Image (cartoon, rainbow, N blue to C red):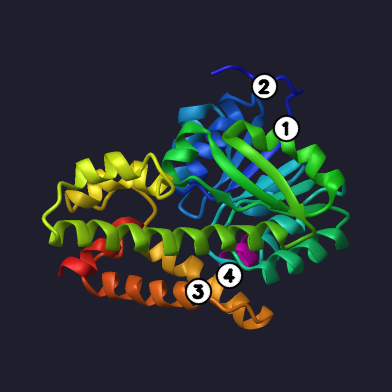
Amino acid sequence: METGAFAMAKVAFIGLGVMGFPMAGHLKVRGGHDVTVYNRTSAKAERWAAEFGGRAAATPAEAAKGQEFVFACVGNDDDLRSVTTGKDGAFETIASGAVFIDNTTASAEVARELYAAASAKGARFIDAPVSGGQAGAENGVLTVMCGGDAEAFDRARPIIEAYARMVGLMGPAGAGQLTKMINQICIAGLVQGLAEGIHFGKKAGLDIERVIDVISKGAAGSWQMENRHKTMNAGKYDFGFAVDWMRKDLDIVLAEARRNGAKLPVTALVDQFYAEVQALGGNRWDTSSLLARLEK
């Protein structure tokens, strides 16, 4: 991979799951940055350091110390608080003027809370959830939706671009998370429609491949149709974003809708359909497994 056109920066990355591990790798290899990593399971941080040539830190505070940019990609709001404002968290040592970029899909509420906490330390905070799944992370082509100050975003953007295809500032703190919620709302209803279409086609005795080949070229076409119809038709659901993760995200969406008064009847219904998929044992199946509950 080519080294980025921007100067090397001192960077920390906290959280090396299926997304964070390759994202941190792109910051080191494609971005050409000096990267220190932290992971709750230290063996994974050591493995990352051995593979990419960076350093592993024992705590988030140690990882963040002296860095210009600190990234995080963890599980949920509580995990995020733990690695930032918790004991040995990154905010204990984060430098004045440093930018904290949070790639976790979390609530807009925690984004605003941590923006304020970072500001009190003289640092900047950007909520920057991503879309594109594990494949997008591995290939460095994620879409990154940011909330925060324009000045901090302008500084962080060339660093983020090491693992992204699209990076946008959506508004003030929390706006990145709200945009990710819209992303998940749109996916939920769309996948249910695709599942029902394939299910209907099978019941009608049609050749699904032939049907999709035709309708995908028209107004019904979508990324989900293009990339998931073959595996859905074959009853294979291990090709992407897990149902457990989608339910976590939809829980955040529906909680925010209760706060802001948005009406999301289809999203709420599809969330319950995903609960049925979990009851079938499909916790780790990808989100296209909505078809499985129709065929049970």
Instruction: Please rate how many residues cluster around mark 1, counting C-alpha atoms within 10 Å: few if below 14, some from 14 to 19, many from 20.
Output: some
Nearer to us: label 1 or label 4:
1
1 over 13 or under it: above or below:
above
Residue sitting farthest toward the top: 2
| Tag 3–tag 1 contact (CB < 8 Å) | no
Q: Which residue is mark 4?
A: 78
Q: Is residue 67 visible?
A: no
Q: Position of residue 257 (x, y in %)?
A: 61, 77
Q: Amino acid at mark 4?
A: Asp
Q: What residue is drawn where x is 81% and y is 38%?
A: 155
- Choose top left, top right, bottom left or bottom right for residue 82: bottom right
| Tag 4–tag 3 contact (CB < 8 Å) | no
Label 4 and label 3: CA atoms lie apart by 14 Å
Instruction: Please rate how many residues cluster around mark 4, counting C-alpha atoms within 10 Å: few if below 14, some from 14 to 19, many from 20.
Output: few
Between 291 and 124, the one lying in front of the other is: 291
Q: Which mark is residue 158?
A: 1
Callout 4 secondary element = helix
Q: Which mark is residue 296?
A: none
Q: Amino acid at mark 3?
A: Asp
Nearer to us: label 4 or label 2:
2
| Tag 2–tag 1 contact (CB < 8 Å) | yes
Q: Main secondary structure of the magenta part?
A: helix
Q: Amino acid at mark 1?
A: Pro
Q: Which mark is residue 251?
A: 3
Q: Position of residue 258 (x, y in %)?
A: 61, 82
